[in-house]
Amino acid sequence: DESVKFWLLSNRIKHFGASGILYEEVLHDLSDDLDSDLLMVMPSTDEVIILKANENTDIGFLFYFAEEICNDHVNERERLSDGVYLYSRSSRRIFPMTREQRG
């Protein structure tokens, strides 16, 4: 199965939903449920796209995906980041990733 599962983090009003990453238990509970670290793309202030981190994840493609969404599909005033981030389940911290890193 080549499909990739992802989760959207937002809020009920779908406005400034990316602020959900500030609530420590939100990411930790999801990473516990998935038994994995998390990869995050945050193109807009309204939502965060979350994927389960694994060794097969193409980080370069995630950067391309983040840049494409941020630059072509998000209103300039709502842009947050064209980067990729790792949520570490063990340290409960978010780290910026580089294109050379692997999941």
Image: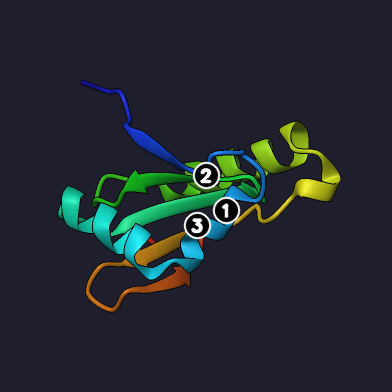
Q: Among all residues in the image, which is located at the extreme bottom? A: 91
| Tag 1 secondary structure | helix
Tell me residue 99's x, y (percent): 50, 58
The label shown at residue 20 is 3
Tell me residue 23's x, y (percent): 44, 66
Q: Is residue 80 above or below residue 92?
A: above
The label shown at residue 10 is 2
Residue of label 1: 18
Please give the name of the residue rendered at 38% of the width and 69% of the height, measured from the top-left corner.
Answer: 24
| Tag 3 secondary structure | helix
Query: In which quarter of the view is residue 35 placed?
Result: bottom left
Instruction: Name the kind of residue labelled 1 in the image.
Output: Ala
Instruction: Name the kind of residue labelled 3 in the image.
Output: Gly
> Is residue 102 among the parts visible in the rendering?
no
Tell me residue 28's x, y (percent): 28, 63
Instruction: Name the kind of residue labelled 2 in the image.
Output: Ser
Q: Is residue 15 above or below residue 93?
A: above
Tags 3 and 1 in contact by the CB under 8 Å rule?
Answer: yes
Tags 1 and 2 in contact by the CB under 8 Å rule?
Answer: yes
| Tag 2 secondary structure | loop
**Dot placed on the residue nearer the N-terminal end, 1 or 2:** 2
Please give the name of the residue rendered at 84% of the width and 45% of the height, measured from the top-left corner.
Answer: 76
Query: In which quarter of the view is residue 86 placed?
Result: bottom left
Query: Quarter of the image containing the N terminus?
Result: top left
Closer to the camera, 61 or 78? 78
Q: CA distance from mark 3 to mark 1?
A: 5 Å
